[in-house]
Image: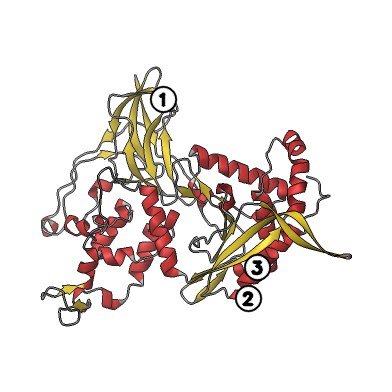
Amino acid sequence: MSKFQLLLPKMGESVAEATIIKWLKKPGDYIEADETVMEIATDKVDSEVPSPVSGKLVEQLCKEEDVVQVGAVIAVIETEGAEESGPAAPQPVAAPAPVPKEEEHTAPVSQPVPEIPGIEQLANRPVAQHKEIAVKSSSRFYSPLVKQIAAEEGISIAELDQIPGNGMEGRLTKDDLLAYVKNRPAQQLGAASQPVVTSQSMPGLAKEQKPVADIAETKPVSATSLSVGDEIIEMDRMRRLIADHMVMSKHTSPHVTSFVEADVTNLVMWREKIKDSFEKRKGEKITFTPIFIEAVVKAIKDMPMINVSVNGTQIIKKQAINIGMATALPNGNLIVPVIKNADGLNLLGLTKAVNDLANKARTGKLQPDDVKDGTFTITNVGTFGNVMGTPIINQPQVAILAVGAIKKKPAVIETEAGDIIAIRHMMFLSLSYDHRVVDGALGGSFIRRVADYLEKWDTGQEL
């Protein structure tokens, strides 16, 4: 018998840690090679950790809700045969040296713990348990590390809920919270400065005074009445993240939506003509999505101020054109994988990228880097037969395009001989944009430019 140390795998260049969501195996269970051992969550996506070897799980080195560093040892698996290559089995360390007398009242004495190469000793971190209760009352998801920092800094749940997050679906990351703490207004550091609501200022309230933060922390009581047969379904974690992100986006950006109707007859006829031969030659199915993305990329090059984000009073003009494509998951939730540097890909490259990301999303194999750094998003509401939509901006971006279903409709066509009515393939495009930095002239011109590229499709082009 030999012992193999299972490490938390690398999940992307920007991901340094993950939260253990659930252990799927317990000590004593036999694990086959490539079988999933646990589920983890990062600030971007949820993932599974498989075992690279077969054997019996003999020790779990982390608990659920622990935050673990990439490369840390998370479990020990007993295997048959020769010694496995890899990190050595954990060895106990000697008891700590006695604390000098002059320090014995100020420095806590650590208990002996197993020395595990590469793992951060999370158990030794001080946690303000009495303050963490307020954080746990929120419906928004926070990692244990974020909860700990909030507790140590005395940040209430009401204040924490107002901090914008740059993680997946608006999740608040450690860096977001530390940046907020660094620039936290001085008046928020003391509870004494919190506004007070009294019965005199708001008739009908109890006479005792309550800080606003305390009132915000009170769990609202639903006014919805329940009838016999009604079913209460608790939101899963991803749905809560989506909900928080959507509410945050509406609070952050004043949304305006512009619409255009495009005649995409030439585009539809071209795709019908080449799709079978294209699939045989390239082994890829060509959908309308990469075609829409190509038109958006061209329009962004023409009007780069739509490819920006906002930081306070600063406008950050993005050099990269990274297009997110909203994708519905089999469980009904939503995720937005990102095609990086889409302006450097031709239509064939965009087709391969779209198909690859869509397949990863359907099979739950997206990595954190697959959903980060988007600068503009497209959502295809036409997939569900909808002719148009008013999408919510995917923060911190400033615009999102919805493409509706393509429908055959009678339309007026101008010819040299006069106007005629013909059956055409028509579709609506709708662009929601952040009116803080995108005015109607830019928003309306941009969506019109996208429509122009689609309407003037070259039916003679080859792939």
Query: Of callouts 2 and 1, which one flags the residue occurring earlier in the amino acid sequence?
Result: 1
Q: In the rendered structure, which amino acid carries the disc numbered 3? A: Phe
Relative horizontal placement of residue 201, taking residue 384 as reference (left or right): left
* Residue assigned mark 1: 84
As drawn, which residue projects farthest toward the bottom?
200
Q: Position of residue 13 (x, y in %)?
A: 50, 49
Closer to us: 221 or 53:
221
Q: Position of residue 295 (x, y in %)?
A: 69, 58
Query: Of callouts 3 and 2, which one flags the residue occurring earlier in the amino acid sequence?
Result: 2
Relative horizontal placement of residue 60, taking residue 241 as reference (left or right): left
Q: Are marks 3 and 2 in contact (CB under 8 Å)?
A: no
Query: Of callouts 3 and 1, which one flags the residue occurring earlier in the amino acid sequence?
Result: 1
Q: In the rendered structure, which amino acid carries the disc numbered 2? A: Ala
* Residue assigned mark 2: 441
User: Which numbered mark, 3 or 1, is in the foreground of this view?
Assistant: 3
Q: Position of residue 11 (x, y in %)?
A: 47, 44
User: Which numbered mark, 2 or 1, is in the foreground of this view?
Assistant: 2
Q: Residue at x 60, y 55 (%)?
A: 404
Classify the position of the C terminus by image quarter: top right
Q: Gap in Å between the C-alphas at discs 3 and 1?
A: 59 Å
As drawn, which residue projects farthest toward the top?
81
Instruction: Please tell me how many numbered marks the rendered image carries.
Output: 3
The 10 Å Cα crowd at callout 2, few under 14, some 14 to 19, many 20 or more, is few
The correct choice, above or below, for 255 with respect to 195 in the image is: above
Closer to us: 56 or 82:
56
* Residue assigned mark 3: 446
Secondary element type, mark 3: helix
Secondary element type, mark 2: helix
Q: For residue 213, what is the image quadrant?
A: bottom left
> Is residue 278 visible to us here?
yes
